């Protein structure tokens, strides 16, 4: 009998956990009234999507950035033109600069700068060359470097891409 009760309780807990996973994310914010009393207000956080190159992104099946609350996730930027063709082929330094130019446009869309970046992940097919030109990042991150990871990879989505940079951003209200 104890075994049946234990299993039933476990199933109920599992069902409650699964049900709570399907609930929309909510954020509780505090507002001050005229009497300076604090009351809680529940605000739903709806994702805000942004496409830098809508036709290219739709063709490949991704969105370049999404903001939820104060967090912004930016997909890996690569060196491409508005039609999705690789640019600066064979030139990792210029590809890196092109990536940062695109990332800056996305940050600006959300009213952010590179000072708001908390994580940067770099994927490159030529780590030795990247290390030679990585000093350019001091022109990008003037106040503080974000956390991040640099990974040498065999290849990226298109063979001509030599570098891909993705960001995570936190924007305070």
Image (spheres, rainbow, N blue to C red):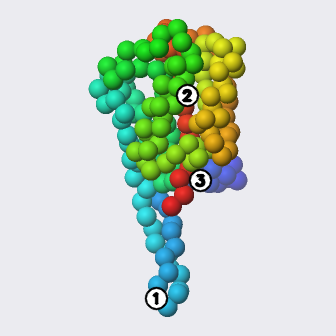
Q: Position of residue 148 (x, y in %)?
A: 67, 34
* SS state under label 2: strand
Question: Does residue 83 appear to the left or right of 157 in the view shown?
Answer: left
The Cα atoms of the two marked residues, 1 and 3, are separated by: 43 Å
1 vs 35, nearest the viewer: 35
Q: Is residue 113 visible?
A: yes
Q: What residue did someone put label 1 on?
A: 34
- 1 or 3: mark nearer the eye: 1
- Label whose residue precedes the other's in the sequence (3 or 2): 3
Q: What residue did someone put label 2 on?
A: 165
Q: Residues within 10 Å of mark 1 (few under 14, many from 20)?
A: few
Q: Is residue 22 visible?
A: no
Residue positioned most to the bottom:
35
Q: Position of residue 137 (x, y in %)?
A: 63, 32
- 1 or 2: mark nearer the eye: 2
Relative vertical location of residue 161 with respect to residue 116 in this rendering, above or below: above
Q: Residues within 10 Å of mark 2 (few under 14, many from 20)?
A: many
3 vs 59, nearest the viewer: 59
* SS state under label 3: helix
Q: Position of residue 104 (x, y in %)?
A: 47, 38
Could you say which disc has been placed on residue 13 in the image? 3
The Cα atoms of the two marked residues, 3 and 2, are separated by: 41 Å
- Label whose residue precedes the other's in the sequence (1 or 3): 3
- Label whose residue precedes the other's in the sequence (1 or 2): 1
Relative vertical location of residue 36 with respect to residue 116 in this rendering, above or below: below
- 3 or 2: mark nearer the eye: 2
12 vs 29, nearest the viewer: 29
Evaluate if marks 3 and 2 touch, with contact meaning CB atoms under 8 Å apart: no
């Amino acid at each position: 009998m104890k075994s049946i009760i234990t299993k039933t309780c476990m199933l109920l807990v599992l069902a409650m956990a699964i049900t709570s996973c399907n609930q929309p994310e909510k954020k509780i914010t505090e507002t001050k009234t005229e009497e300076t009393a604090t009351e809680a207000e529940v605000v739903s956080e709806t994702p805000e999507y942004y496409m830098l190159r809508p036709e290219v992104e739709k063709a490949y099946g991704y969105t370049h950035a999404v903001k939820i609350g104060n967090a912004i996730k930016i997909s890996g930027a690569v060196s491409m033109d508005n039609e999705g063709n690789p640019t600066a082929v064979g030139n990792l330094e210029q590809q890196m600069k092109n990536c940062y130019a695109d990332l800056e446009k996305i940050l600006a869309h959300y009213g952010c700068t590179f000072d708001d970046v908390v994580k940067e992940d770099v994927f490159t097919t030529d780590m030795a060359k990247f290390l030679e030109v990585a000093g350019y990042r001091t022109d990008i991150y003037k106040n503080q470097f974000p956390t991040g990871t640099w990974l040498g990879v065999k290849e990226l989505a298109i063979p001509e891409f030599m570098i891909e940079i993705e960001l995570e951003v936190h924007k305070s209200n």
